[in-house]
Amino acid sequence: MSRWTKDVLRQVRPHFIIQSIKDPKRAFREIKFRYTFTSKSRFTSDILSLSRSPFEVLDESKQRNFSSSLKSQITRSSISSGRGPMGDEAELLYICVRLMKPAFVVETGVGAGFSTACILKALKRNNFGMLYSIDLFKDDETCGWIIPNQLKKRWRLIKGSSANHLNPLLSQLGLIDIFIHDSDHSYENMISEFRRVWPHLKKGGIFMAHDVGRNDALFDFLKEIQFPWWRVRTYKWLAGFQKPLRKKESIVYGKNFIR
């Protein structure tokens, strides 16, 4: 029995049956969401269409030390943006950026800046690419305070809501390589961002969203674009998938591996 099947079967309990009767759509979403659960290695290799584990070609030891250092700073500090860090999922952002070597990465939601710092660390190691972040933060919040100054060269922070700033940014950039949603997790905001970004995400580009288990936005969007939901990969609360290529097209990441 596969691990995915076991995760799904764990839901078949008395309380889940009762919940299914009360809210069938939510129950079905939970089953689909758990079916997409996977490991760190499988998450990255699948959404990047790699034939082998990324850990075989990318030494992550220094990145783990970097992540641990940032987490300890957040834990010890009294500074707060009102939002917690992404967690271990941020390390997957680092891996994807290191291997893909994107020109343009767009994220919505920054908070303290843990995941943003991981992305910027990868861009610096690549010596290529820019990260554009949109975050709606109050004047008394310190947005991205955890990000080391030496990483900010490849970062552009746009203050405001994605509703107001995402379209102008995408029009300016044209096509982007990676999109990461981690802003307001309401259904309306999530599906609105997804719909606006999709035409600007290049074929073979990576689409990722955090906290996708909160509502039906991701699965409804997948239905709209006719993308099979079972091809999505989820590690903890981060979901990701690759925008389909045209027939007979393929991406070769050989030149993008660490040098």
Image: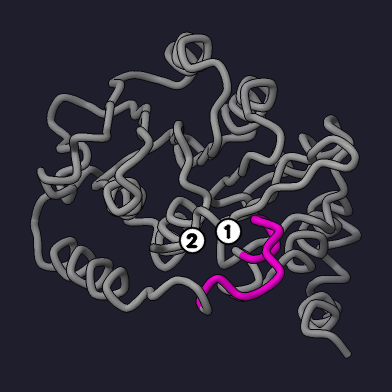
Q: Quadrant of residue 114?
A: bottom left
When the figure is inspected, residue 64 is found, relative to residue 161, above or below; the finding is: below
Distance from Cα at disc 2 to Cα at disc 1:
6 Å
- Secondary structure of the residue carrying numbered label 1: helix
On screen, residue 45 versus residue 247, left or right, reads left
- Secondary structure of the residue carrying numbered label 2: loop
Image coordinates of residue 201 in percent, x first then y, are 63, 29
When the figure is inspected, residue 75 is found, relative to residue 240, above or below; the finding is: below
| Residue found 13% across the figure and 64% down from its top | 73
| Residue found 85% across the figure and 80% down from its top | 5
Proximity of marks 2 and 1: CB atoms separated by less than 8 Å: yes
Q: Which residues are magenta?
A: 45-55
| Residue found 48% across the figure and 17% down from its top | 173
On screen, residue 156 versus residue 175, left or right, reads left
Residue 257's mark? 2
Image coordinates of residue 45 in percent, x first then y, are 64, 66
Image coordinates of residue 84 in percent, x first then y, are 32, 54
The colour scheme of the drawn protein is one colour
Image coordinates of residue 118 in percent, x first then y, are 32, 55
